[in-house]
Amino acid sequence: MIELIPFTEADIDRLIGWVDSLETHLLWTASFFEYPLTREPFLKLLQESAERGDRRFYKAVDSATGEAVGHLELGAIDHRNRSTRIGRVLVAPQAQGRGVGTGMMRAALEIAFERMGMHRVDLWVFDINPRAIACYEKVGFQHEGLCRESFKAPEGYWGMMIMSLLESEWRGTPGTAGTTETVKRS
């Protein structure tokens, strides 16, 4: 079972250790942070987001072992339109292939729909990341569109796929609503 626990300054070094290549860095953060990642820009983002209240950071923890196995953010929080965006999803290298991403997404959706009262959750994912796309489809995300060749990577251009899930779909999607994933309140 995956729990999402608020991410703190104490978690930054572990997260930096998971981003061990330029490709991992770009898949995780596009070009939001410079590579290699350092503490200072991430600490600045945590502080600015706390002041604005428009973003929440989480570490994913395997409740059976207590091991930190991932990171994700809920950003672009728009209470008026009841929408948010899942971003910067990263599964720890040692936890990949164990269903952690699916557990993280289900827990994030529970926060968004059940705790925050959102109507819509969306995300953007590179079209060259089939494992992430399959994970998002598994929990019910629908394809909305593709921004073709919108990101210049070292070996060429990547497209950015837009996916979303509506509250009504969350409540009716088999295998998503009523999961056993738990969330510690932030």
Image: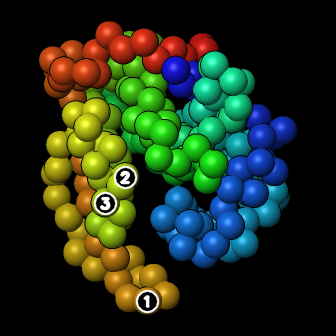
**Callout 3: helix, strand or loop?**
helix
At 79% across and 63% down in the image, what residue appears? 38
Q: Is residue 51 left or right of residue 171?
A: right
Q: Is residue 77 visible?
A: no
Q: Quadrant of the C terminus?
A: top right
Mark closer to the chain start, 1 or 2: 2
Q: At label 1, which amino acid type do we have?
A: Glu
Q: In the rendered structure, are the residues bearing label 2 and label 3 in contact, judged by CB atoms less than 8 Å apart?
A: yes
Compared to 83, does 93 lie above or below?
below
* Residue 177 drawn at (x, y percent): 28, 15
Q: Determine which residue is flagged by label 3.
A: 130
Gap between marks 2 and 3, in whole Å? 5 Å
Could you classify mark 3 by the number of other residues whose Cα lies within 10 Å: few (under 14), some (14-19), or many (20 or more)? few
Compared to 114, does 42 lie above or below?
below
**Callout 2: helix, strand or loop?**
helix
At 54% across and 61% down in the image, what residue appears? 29
Q: Determine which residue is flagged by label 2.
A: 132
Q: Which mark is residue 97?
A: none
Gap between marks 1 and 2, in whole Å? 20 Å
* Residue 80 drawn at (x, y percent): 35, 26
Gap between marks 3 and 1, in whole Å? 17 Å
**Callout 1: helix, strand or loop?**
loop
Q: At label 3, which amino acid type do we have?
A: Pro
